[in-house]
Image (tube, rainbow, N blue to C red):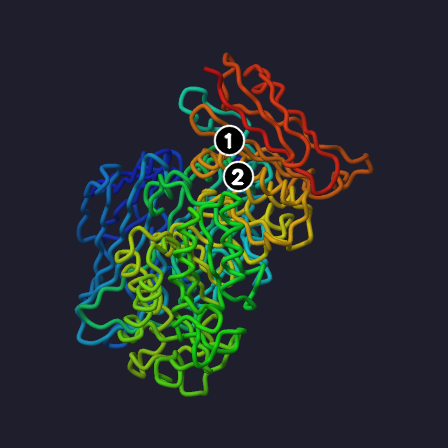
Amino acid sequence: MPDVAGQQRTRSTGGALEPIRVDAGSWGLSWAIDGDGRLHQLGVGPDGHRASLDVDAQWYPYAYPTLDGTDPFRPPALQVTHADGTLSTRLSLRSVERHPNDDGHGEHVVVRTVDELFDFTVEHHLRTHPDSGVLEQWVEIVHEEAGPVTVLAHDSISPFLLVADDAEYVQFGGAGWADEWRWSTDALTIGSTVLASLGGVQPHLQRSPCLLLSPTGPTSLAGLTAAADGVDGALESDGHHVLGFSVAWGGNAHLSLDVRPKAEPGAHRELRIRAGASALGAPYRLDPGQRMVLPSVAWTWSSSGSDGVTEAFHRWSRARVLRDPERIRPLVVNNWEATFFDFDQHRILGLIDRTAELGADVFLLDDGWFGTVHPRNDDTRGLGDWDPDVRKLPGGLAALASAAQARGVRFGIWVEPEMVNPTSELYEAHPDWVLRDARAPKEHRNQLYLDPLQPEVRDFEVDVVSRTLASAPGTSYLKWDANRPITDPGSRALAPDRQANLWFDHVVATWELMDRVAAAHPDVELMLCASGGGRVDHGTLRRFHEFWTSDNTDPVARVRMQWACSHFFPAATMAAHVTRWGERPMAFACAVALSGRFGVDVDLGALSDSERAALTRSVHVARRTQEVVQRGRLRRHVSPVDGDHRSSAAWSLSLGERTVVFAYQLDTPTAAAGTEQPPTSPGPIVLVDLDRSASYDLRCTDLEELDESSVVDGGDLVTAGLEWPLTEPLTARIWEISRRS
């Protein structure tokens, strides 16, 4: 296999200026400066920050290509129409600044470039986190030209790589609602591929803004943990290079892959990656003095396969993204699938009683609790009128919150502050608050989207949350939903020649109101939802504690979703509830939910005795394992999305001296593709992170009748492992392993 990673350390000779080197931890990059001040990529990869300069900088690929006539055959990372109509942009280096990060880990590098003709500045920001190996990179644009400029393309990153002929990437694009995080492995073929996430408010229903790239060969060779360093738990380099990318943006985004062959026989292909906010249909008019801050793209380079990408993103997310990362997320019971809109105070109080009996932490009251003139008895009316429906709840939310607290349960509430039904008091009073163009607005799910660019709308939405929480003193959990995309882009807050700015500005405005809510209610845990996982990105997540992974809670589908999602997000962020979706066995549904932020969304009063017993056992397991699951280091053992055992899945999480292992049989084992051999089960689950010299207490359960304990030798777990025990579909095993003192 070609040494593609080594090839990134291209050659160069000295110039007047020293290269700009960024050490991202276990990898890095270098930019060289040519005689005209143009930035060229000297190196990227495991030794990219140490790349030597062996020939003139001009012979290296541009670090950030602009539309300037140098390469008219490829899409540029930046394209601007200047105030006088000039279409080209040529940037040269003005300054480099280095500042320590506020948390004392890593540095913030600012590379400032200016156009050779115009007072037009492009700043490259690179923020390192050596503890994880994740680099955050973004661009900021500001100018002082005679009038506004139009930004037509505006990528945050544009690295250049050499890749093998059999290089692959994994994207996460599905059919839309209830099909998030679909794992799709594709060959990195010649040409341009654009992986777009569209929809504005809930773009990630269609495609996650995340990507795995294997430049040295098939991703299947880089998928599972094989070995680990027994000193610090760091993964050893196994020669399988995988890059992970995440566009931290709550709106339309893209990851674009431009692949070109080389004429020389046997030469590696050239790959230019561009990523950031999507500019599709969104030319941005930027006024003099206005600063356009493009979204951050978090990326990392692992020399130890996709588990290395996972470890990097989990460490970085806990350090730089998650709110209250040390707080154990609660066990939540939601009423939605038990009642939908059909409930009253008596029914909810009964569910709160059963929540307390189960031993859960939070009771969450979902949609349907509000609307006085237009009661919210279905999804056609009442949205926007956030006063409790006293016909359903004569005591209001306060009576429910008080009842929950009296039973030792926290109270949570659902809101959808950004939306409105046309049949509502809010719309009747403020039809001008709706986002729309000159045409009649199109309803989606019987609702319209409130225009966040209008300050009074943002004030209203913040007040929705504050008033709702104030009406139920002690409420400490809030689910924030958003159930429609943008279909009528247009805002009264924007001038006619700036209407396309909406696609960018609505994210900035929405984040501003989310920041206000988070600051005003720091002790309230916030769940992010958008028709399921429509808003799952590292940018929006900074304002929340967790997200609703998908409305699809069929545990068979969820195993594969959570497998994919966990490459970039730790289990603490992935709400995973036990439901009736798929009509799977209760024990199996519980076992799957236990591998995320465990919760329950079934009618607790309609359980059979065996179902109630399985759910009760699951709560006990959750109490013993939730700290390890939510904060532990993830290792993958059996893949449900590629390889020869896709009907099975297994992974483990370790924290300190404890490990939890999950194994699932999703379907009847099948034979390996292309063979006529009888189907085989996966091999043993080898736990390479454990201490060979120690003894461990091991407890194994299937959440039904099996609950066995034993003492095992660490050497056996590291070498022989746990034998695969499952043969029947829709069964599971959970092992709890702790080192003996």
User: 322 or 366, which lies in front?
Assistant: 366
User: Is residue 354 shown left or right of residue 647?
Assistant: left
Secondary element at image label 1 = loop
Tell me the kind of residue under disc 2.
Thr
Q: Quadrant of the C terminus?
A: top left
Is disc 2 surrounded by few (<14), some (14 to 19) or many (20+) residues within 10 Å? many
Above or below, 125 relative to 670: below
What x and y, as percent, mark residue 719?
Answer: 59, 18
Looking at the figure, which quarter contains the N terminus? top right
Circles 2 and 1, Cβ within 8 Å, touching? The answer is yes
Q: What residue does disc 1 label? A: 239
Amino acid type at image mark 1 = Gly
Q: Is residue 701 above or below residue 293?
A: above
The residue that appears at 23% across and 52% down in the rendered structure is 37
Q: Position of residue 415 (x, y in %)?
A: 42, 65
Disc on the earlier residue, 2 or 1? 2
Residue that carries the numbered disc 2 in the rendered image: 216
Is residue 345 at least partly visible in the picture?
A: yes
**Label 1 crowding class (10 Å Cα cut-off): few <14, some 14-19, many 20+?**
some
Is residue 274 visible to the viewer in this orientation of the structure? no
State left or right for residue 204 relative to residue 560: left
Residue reaching furthest top? Answer: 693
Query: Is 231 on the left or on the right of 220, as rendered?
Result: left
Q: Which of 229 and 455 lies nearest the eye of the viewer?
A: 455
Q: Secondary structure at mark 2?
A: loop
Among the 4 quarters of the image, the one containing residue 100: top left
Q: Where does residue 569 sit, x and y in percent of width and height?
A: 45, 45
| Numbered-mark total | 2
